[in-house]
Image: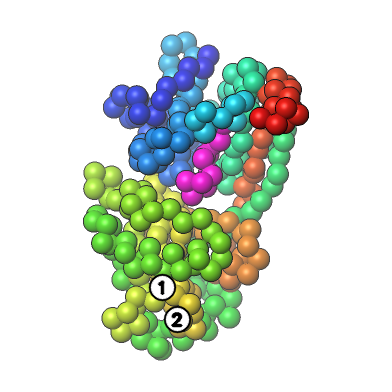
Amino acid sequence: MIFKKAIFELTNSEIDLCNNLLIASPDRHIFNDIRLHLRIQDYYKNTVEGNVLFFSSNGNITAYIIIYHIIGKKPINYFSPYQKSLITYGGIVCSGGRSQQKLYLKELKKYLRKRRAIYIKSIPGTDIGVYRELGFKINEKQTLYINTQKSEKELWGGIENRIKRNIKKGYQSNIRVDVIIPKIIEDIEPLYEIYSELCARTGLYLHSKSYYFSILDNNNYEHSLIFYAYKEEQVVSAMAVLQFDEIIISWFGGTFIKYRNTNAASLIYWEIIKYACSHNLECFDLLGLDIQNIAFFKKGFGGYELPVYHISYNSFSYKVVNKIRKLIGR
């Protein structure tokens, strides 16, 4: 059985229940943390509606999926997650195995029958076989994980020589890296300036500064860090990272174009790896290998590739209604 509830209407006990399911899930990831999505929904409240679909069995909630759709757009196409939010992964959160997941996906398909469709970007390493069995369309991408449950010496040994040289040059150039816990909007100012320049240069979508701060703000919910690289007293590079349980993720960042030869980016990534190692974290997710030159840079740090699946399902009625709307130009 499925029932839907708006993210803003969740009670504290329902939020706690979701967090407990998430911690127990093999697909645990901060991008499925309800507390993060409360902030996203607050920002998008006038244009996008966020809901949680709860799956229940014998009166007990056993799984959930966070979904969004654009307000006023018909027929309804759900997104898990809402891609424009920069939240990268979604999908069903449950503590059960393959057989239970299959039951939840069957229920989800039933729910989508009434002129609905869904697009899911899965957690890395998701068991995709059940989705294929049930007729979901699959498109495979890759991300890069580094196992940080190793010694610093072992992690250094896994880095390619080209990256090692860059890191050493960064140290020799007196680049230093500081880590801050953002709690006021001024904490993200240099990060936002760097990312604004990157977006202007590459055409990436740029949100307002307040949006990024709403996600990174650690007041009442500690989950993020910013790594800043300095040349003397000038910030030259930055990376925002998110952390949940034992996984740390590089979310967004960059380097000022005039300082791109300082090797600060290589130094920041190495400092994140060392941080994860010293804090006994399980792994570092470098978040995507879609852009060729960035993928080449990331792969230099070692690690292993994991599949990320773009999953979609369009109900028959959704296809019919969508085709009619296209024919009549609506």
Residue at 54% in and 77% down = 163
Pointer 1 residue: 237
Of helix, strand and loop, which one carries label 1?
strand
Badge 1 amino acid: Ser
Residue at 28% in and 81% down = 233
- In the image shown, does 54 or 236 lie closer to the viewer? 236
> From what the image shows, is residue 49 above or below residue 170?
above
The image position of residue 53, as x and y in percent, is 49, 24
Residue 59 shows in the view = yes
Residue at 46% in and 43% down = 31
Please tell me in which quadrant of the rendered image residue 52 appears. top left
Q: Residue 259 carries which label?
A: 2
Residue sitting farthest toward the bottom: 172
Q: How crowded is mark 1: few (under 14 residues within 10 Å), some or many (20 or more)?
A: many
Please tell me in which quadrant of the rendered image residue 330 appears. top right
Identify the magenta region. 78-93
Please tell me in which quadrant of the rendered image residue 253 appears. bottom left
Q: How crowded is mark 2: few (under 14 residues within 10 Å), some or many (20 or more)?
A: some
Q: Is residue 74 left or right of residue 197?
A: right
> From what the image shows, is residue 135 above or below residue 139?
above
Mark 1 to mark 2: distance in Å? 8 Å
Residue at 66% in and 35% down = 312
Q: In this view, does 271 lie to the left or right of 325?
A: left
Q: Is residue 305 magenta?
A: no
Residue 23 shows in the view = no
Q: Residue 303 carries which label?
A: none
Of helix, strand and loop, which one carries label 2?
helix
